[in-house]
Image: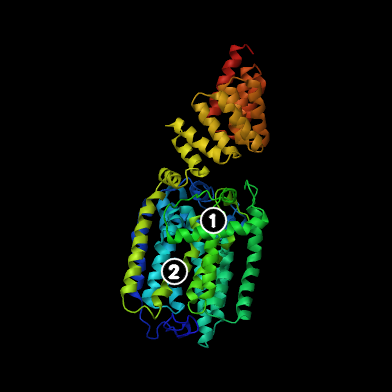
Amino acid sequence: MTDAAPEIAQSSPAEEPPAGAGARFPLGAIAAIVLAVVVVFFPILDHGFLGWDDPQSIRHNPALNPVTATSFIDAWRAPHMQLYIPVTYTVWGAVAVLAQATGADGAGDRPGLFHAASLLLHLGAALLVFALLRRLGLREAAAAVGAVLFAIHPVQVETVAWASGMKDVLAGLLVLAVLYHYAGFVVAIRGERPARLSLVLAGVFYGLALLAKPSAVAAPLLVGVLGVVWFRRPLREVAAIVGAGLLLAIPVALVARAVQPTMAIPFVTPVHLRPVIALDAVAFYVAKILAPVQLAFDYGRSPARVLAGSEVYASWIVPVAFGAGAWILWRPFPALAAGLGILVVAVAPVLGLVPFDFQSYSTVADHYLYVAMLGPALILAAILNAEAWSGRRPLVVAAALVVILGGRSAMAVPTWRDDMALFDGCLAVNPESVAANTNLALLVRADDPTRAEELLRVALATEPGKASTHHNLANVLNQLGRPGEALGFNIEATRLRPEVATFHFGLGNTLFFKLGRPREGAEAYARVIELEPEHVTAHLYLGMLNASVGRHDEAERLVARALEIDPESEEGQRIRVMIQEERRRAGQ
């Protein structure tokens, strides 16, 4: 019995055999973890990039297509896509270099390499969970089962199978390294060995984690959970370590807040209701961990929808009940308190206590659970490690459970194969998903505009104030030969987001090409040029419009400006010839 984990661990962390001092290399456990990860996730190597963040993050990111030495410098110099994550962009850049070395023009041509990198990082995280559980004093077999649960639980599929999810895997790996080295610090202290190096390494990995993804800010609090609940270290000591970590996070948090504005959120939760949203999110996560079915990238669980439903009045019971149980069982079963603490603390930055952009879709998402799954892994491993469980039967039962979960994950992996599978799969879970309806509409629009219209109308009914949906629906209605209906949606898009040039351009196209109203079309194209002075097509179409009413000098000036912006524009050359021919026919 030890003070690290009473009635559970068979050896104190301080008594962990040092490497090279007679400790047996856990080849069997490592092989089992590797095999589980490879069997479940190997198919992602044949997956492509998705339309969900991958185009902006990787596939069409100019910094990665092609990647240059400047790309790496720029990743550290300034934020990209409203995120300052230079460590992630450095890793993506390294993969892009490898892609170019294989003959590709850039990152966008080699999705398999990015999926392979995610798979390797996830495997590293799973092995690190095993090493951490061993360092917490748990037996090899129990730690291995816990690590496999972490690695192949169905909620991990989104993070690992989604190329853009690599930032979560990378940051998660680095956070796990922080916890591993903190545990090493405690082991060294108890063994009366030098411990400073472990804390230094924990600090280094924490800094890297923050620069991989800002949500890693929770790492010091995770250290606090282990220090107080599992190791039962003096509060003053733990507070000093946690406080130092939070101080280190302040600059990163300020940068993240500055480059990730919440203006896009249609509904910002009132402060007094944010704990309600947070408790609902925790209840949702507990339910998905215990019963990982109906998984989707967009659950549609936005604050507005949660508060509008009746479920919110009961969902708080789940986290409160689990919290009360953990408090009661803290001393006899510290793994429950530590595991639940890790689960809640790991997702704390994205529980809605502070608003964030993705809340416009949903407060909850599977990829937010990546590090949080360490909590359930610890609880399961500690149960298997308990002295009350003798023999192999508990391990066999747990292994069977993990195999079932792995099978469920293997069934979920194909959902992330391509855009059609992803968005169709999401609609099967959340038929009102704005993201899935909109993206699927854009995919099917060319071949099935009628279905595209249906999908966009569902999206619009769910979120009437989304300007891009009005714009997309107008385009589909024009395709269906109903420009009179389309015009209303064009006008609404420009009213909702008057600063977006694309929406004014769509309005101009409907007015000029579909409805034959050149004067109003000219006003729309002029507004496009005002907002985006180098918009080539707006110059060309405004030139055509001027030519149609006999203003050939102005038409040629506009076309000349378009060709000055883009000398290679074939459309510009064609329109210039057309205007010149019209001018000759007019005798000018």
Pair 1/2: label in front: 2
Q: Residues within 10 Å of mark 1 (few under 14, many from 20)?
A: few
Asked whether, in this view, residue 500 is left or right of residue 394, the answer is right
**Residue, disc 2:** 377
Q: Amino acid at mark 2?
A: Ala
Label 1: element kind: helix
Q: Position of residue 259 (x, y in %)?
A: 64, 53
101 or 355, nearer to the observer: 355
In this picture the colour scheme is rainbow
Q: With respect to residue 424, does 556 lie above or below?
A: above
Q: Amino acid at mark 1?
A: Ala
Label 2: element kind: helix
Q: Position of residue 541 (x, y in %)?
A: 59, 26
**Residue, disc 1:** 69
- Say how many tags the image has: 2
Asked whether, in this view, residue 90 is left or right of residue 411, the answer is right
Q: Position of residue 107 (x, y in %)?
A: 46, 50
In the rendered image, the quadrant that contains the N terminus is bottom left
- Ranked by sequence position, the earlier of labels 1 and 2 is 1
